[in-house]
Image: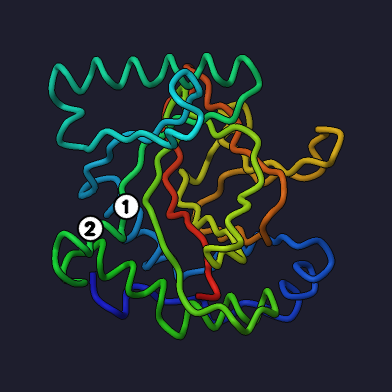
Amino acid sequence: MTKTLFAINPGLDRASHAAEFAASGRVQIRDVLTTEAACEIRRLLASETRFGVAAQGQDGEADEGPRRISGREITTQSGKQRMRDLAQDAYRAAGKGDYAFLYAQYSLVEDVQHAGGATTPHGILLEHLNAPEFLGLVRDVTGIAELVKADAQATLYAPQHFLSRHIDSHVAEGWRVAYVLNLAPDDWHPDWGGYLNFYDEEGDIVHGYRPRFNALNLFAVPRPHAVSYVPPFAPVGRFAITGWLRDR
């Protein structure tokens, strides 16, 4: 992946996207990258990313936090059994109304740390997400000039994956805007789930974004949101790059 392959679409109407964000605190920017760039990133996720699993349940201690299985471990018998156990913990927690999630994950930040610098394709992608071009786009749309860096993970919501309702309240860590760079199949069907949904105080869905190829979702945090359950009959998964844009 070369620098020219992460190219923002020069035809974006930043003013209209900024107006939408100012009105609601959220926006979906379609065709955010050039088609060539978006296709290359999706190829990287589909062909060169060793996804692990991230899960959250409440069967353990309340402060235990998320649990992860690496892409290497997940190929072993013990790793497969642990993945099944974590999945059941997540389903039980979600069934009780607790915060829970289960999805495939690969940290771009940890990739850079292990490689000792942005020398891998994933590291180069993280470098692009922290470059002036991308940060400038987000500052223009959100009106938040203080944004200085982005973290990132590659995510895959495959059948039986979900992220339950939560608010992303890590203000002390500098989180200001959450983002999802969608790289889903072009023909993602609404019945396959994987929607980014937003809720009001009574738990009603007030807005939702269908997974789309080459679409960037931005929303101010904290606010209630979730990724809806991907059912077992969904034939494919939803690739994305996700993370938070920070002011420190």
Provide the residue designation for mark 2. Answer: 111
Mark 2 → mark 1, Cα distance in angstroms: 6 Å
Provide the residue designation for mark 1. Answer: 107
Left or right of 136 in this view: 45: left
Q: Amino acid at mark 1?
A: Ser
**Front residue (pair 185, 98):** 98
**Front residue (pair 76, 89):** 89
Q: Percent position (x, y) of residue 209?
A: 66, 46
User: Decide: marks 2, 1 in contact (CB < 8 A)?
Assistant: yes
Q: Percent position (x, y) of residue 164?
A: 60, 32
Disc 1 element: strand
Disc 2 element: helix
Residue 176 found in image quarter: bottom right
Q: Amino acid at mark 2?
A: Asp
Question: At 75% across and 67% down in the image, what residue appears?
Answer: 21
Q: Percent position (x, y) of residue 177?
A: 61, 64
